[in-house]
Amino acid sequence: MSAMALSKSKQAESDYYAKLGEGGLEHSARKPYSDDNCAQYHANLAALFGVIEPPPQRIVDFGCGTGWLSLCLAQRGYQVMGVDISRDAILCAQKEAAKRGLDNARFVTADYEDFSEDGISSDYAVFHDALHHAESETQALSCAYRTLRIGGAAIVIEPGRGHHLAESSKRAVETFGVHEREMHPSRVVAAAKRSGFRRHLVLPFPFHHNRFIYRRTYKGTMSSGELRRRCLLGALRVIRQFLPNRREGMVVLWK
Ligand SMILES: C[S@@+](CC[C@H](N)C(=O)[O-])C[C@H]1O[C@@H](n2cnc3c(N)ncnc32)[C@H](O)[C@@H]1O
């Protein structure tokens, strides 16, 4: 990363993992299994695998953290570069890649709003749960745009509506000084247009399909008829996700 001084909030992002301590870092490194959002992460991963071409493709994972997603992609055979502002997170990701023998996963400490690396011409840029930490999403998406080949795509999967108002987000802002911003699809698409992206598609939030259909609450249902009704209701909720004005979703942006 350049020797230029970071802004206060970026310094906070950079220090976050060190402040979390051993336990926090361990939790992060063992994602997605260590996390209560395990099902959500898997749904996102499945959607990502559905949208991208099979390996070999080159993927940059912006704001990769300790690298769980990069490592999954690398294990599938993609050429992956993980980028994160936190040196502690990157060291952890590098260690894990070495442990798994993944020489197709490379990790660099860098600010994704000021990222330039010679000779990258990636097929995909991914922001998973990371763009809402940006000071400027336009800057971040402009950097992603520059890493992509013509016809390449950025895929943005951010937390759902109201994430910035969640207690855990407020606590993270208070305790660590990191960014927790609302990053709904319309904001992403507006920034993407400013960054040069030509086309976009907003797809339903992958986890909603899981959430509405694959439910633990079926067990409390007494009759087969009631089970079928609940299942149908779930399917209708999935269909509703395709209506316009969604404030959450997976955004695909093409260069
Ligand atoms: C909520 S974590 C998500 C990490 C990972 N993508 C995941 O899905 O677990 C957000 C990540 O964005 C990183 N980040 C925040 N601002 C950044 C910046 N300006 N440049 C690069 N990484 C940044 C943080 O260090 C953190 O690892």
Image (tube, rainbow, N blue to C red):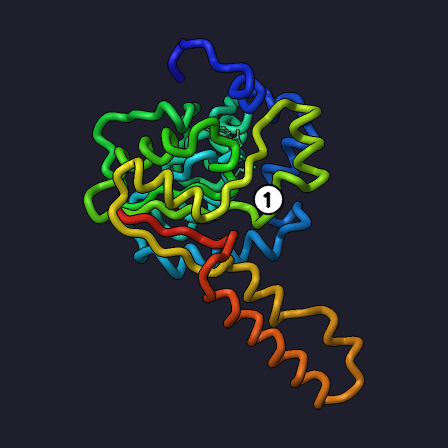
| Along the line of sight, the residue nearer the viewer: 133 or 240 | 240
| 222 on left or right of 31 | right
Kindly state the secondary structure of the residue where label 1 is placed. Answer: loop
Which quarter of the rendered picture does the N terminus lie within? top left
| 224 on left or right of 189 | right
| 165 on left or right of 62 | right
Q: Is residue 79 visible?
A: no
Which quarter of the rendered picture does the C terminus lie within? top left
Q: Position of residue 169 (x, y in %)?
A: 66, 36
| Along the line of sight, the residue nearer the viewer: 82 or 224 | 224
Q: Would the CB of label 1 be found within 8 Å of ligand 1?
A: yes
Residue in view at x 34 percent, y 25 percent: 115
- Residue at the farthest left position: 150
Q: Amino acid at mark 1?
A: Lys
| 143 on left or right of 16 | left
For disc 1, the marked residue is 31
Residue in view at x 43 percent, y 29 percent: 136
Q: Is residue 247 visible?
A: yes
Residue in view at x 48 percent, y 54 percent: 249
Q: Position of residue 153 (x, y in %)?
A: 30, 47
Is 59 located above or below residue 175 in the figure?
A: below
Q: Position of residue 11 (x, y in %)?
A: 54, 17
Circle 1 packing at 10 Å, graded few (<14), some (14-19), many (20+), is some
Q: Position of residue 47 (x, y in %)?
A: 45, 59
Say how many tags the image has.
1
Residue in view at x 54 percent, y 70 percent: 238
